[in-house]
Amino acid sequence: MDIAGLISDEEVRQFQEDGAICLRRVFDQRWVDEVTTGVERNIAEPSDYAGTLKADEDDQGGFFDDYYNWRRIPEYAAFVHEAPVAPMVARLMQSETAAFYHEHLLVKWPGTFKRTPWHHDQPYYPVDGHQTCSIWMPVDPVAESACVQFVRGSHNWGRWFVPRKFASESNYTLDEPGSTPMMKEIRFEDVPPIDEHPEQYDILSWDMEPGDVIAFHMLALHGAAGNQSLTHARRVLVTRWFGDDTRFATRPWEISPTVTGGLKPGDPMACDEFPLIWPRS
């Protein structure tokens, strides 16, 4: 496989510097259809992790999400193992390998007022290291007003923010201080009030079509408005990936998802539960 042909040197540079990049038409109709079928199956057969959030009782739509279903939804498994996503993220991460963590379905039905609060993902997860990448793949056209937004370069701030509950937008409760040997100096801060001072930040967002994706670092601050369309859903599958330098970590709150693969602090993330997808065996 021509990995360099999938992702250019300029796109690698942009991902490394900005923390988020929109890649156009990287998946053909076969993979759009495959993922769409999986999304429809997931919505019809949700797991115990699934839930729907609404801004208030007047919210016409709802923000539905579900995750960690790739082993039971064959279309998700096919995408992870067979689509060229693993070599693509390995190149973006500048990693020799790409291990798969889990997928996350995010659906904002027409007329959804509920927003996604500003946050970054890595503090939710039991992972330290810098070679991380998530792929945000819509199966519907997405207007920029409904697209996820990113603070350019925030993954390189050297700052970690307390996870936030999507329902209440309040911080997770800090149960106990703690970190792995790899992250002894880590200190968690409150997410800055980005919406109160948007002029202070360089915000990235895009209009998107099926086949386009956003690749973003797990420390990139991001959030999203609701879905103002009264006729079109915003269905997105996110897949999450790890590179060479990632190690299992502890967190001072319950991780999400709660699976650990039997790993101990300092262990490489690639394992039976989080399989190595690239290079192909």
Image: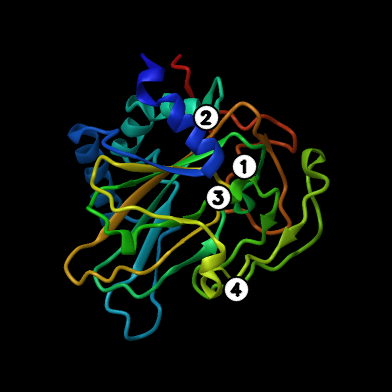
Image disc number at residue 220: 3
Which of the pair 119/102 is nearer the observer?
A: 119
Sequence-earlier tag: 2 or 4:
2
Q: Horizontal placement of 225 versus 179: left or right?
A: left
Image disc number at residue 170: 4
How far apart, in angstroms, are the residues tagged by discs 3 and 4? 19 Å
Instruction: Find numbered disc 1 in the image and state the secondary structure of the residue it sits on.
Output: loop
Residue picked out by circle 1: 260
| Quarter that holds the C terminus | top left
Q: Amino acid at mark 4?
A: Ser
- Characterize the local packing of mark 1: few (<14), some (14-19) or many (20 or more) Cα atoms within 10 angstroms: some
Q: Is 95 located above or below residue 29 in the figure? A: above
- The image quadrant that residue 88 belongs to is top left
Q: Are marks 2 and 4 in contact (CB under 8 Å)?
A: no
Sequence-earlier tag: 2 or 3:
2
How far apart, in angstroms, are the residues tagged by discs 2 and 1? 14 Å
